Amino acid sequence: IADAAHQIRTPLTALASQADLLSDEASPIRREQQIARIQERIQELGRLTSQLLSHAMIIHRSEAARFEPVDLVEVARRALHE
């Protein structure tokens, strides 16, 4: 949880800073640049959140699944045959 919080905090801090800069910006060109940066940060946060959720699902499934021995020779023979 601490790692996830740290990973999320950094882009959130950057997003808040960019929003503050945007509120004080008078230049239309610079406002558009700030908006583009905010959109990039939002996409970054979305990717990070998806990665964290995927990681959590993998951990959950690995703890819930039972592992059984697999005869790799048999798997290879069937693959070769097919």
Image (cartoon, rainbow, N blue to C red):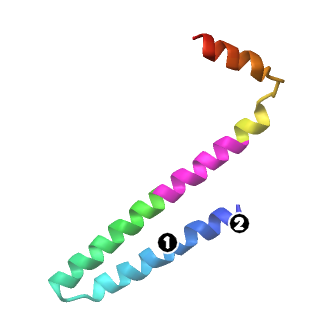
Could you tell me which secondary element the residue under label 2 belongs to? Answer: helix
Q: Give the main secondary structure, helix, strand or loop, of the magenta stretch.
A: helix
Q: Quadrant of the N terminus?
A: bottom right
Q: Tell me where the magenta segment starts and ends, as one range.
A: 47-59
Residue 45 point in image, percent of width and height: 47, 62
Q: Is residue 24 above or below residue 47?
A: below
Question: Farthest residue in the left direction?
Answer: 28
* Quadrant position of residue 63: top right
Q: Residue at x 44, y 63 (%)?
A: 44
Q: Is residue 55 above or below residue 25?
A: above
Q: Earlier in the sequence, mark 1 or mark 2?
A: 2
Q: Residue at x 40, y 60 (%)?
A: 43
For residue 43, which numbered disc appears in the image? none
Could you tell me which secondary element the residue under label 1 belongs to? Answer: helix
For residue 2, which numbered disc appears in the image? 2
Q: Amino acid at mark 1?
A: Pro
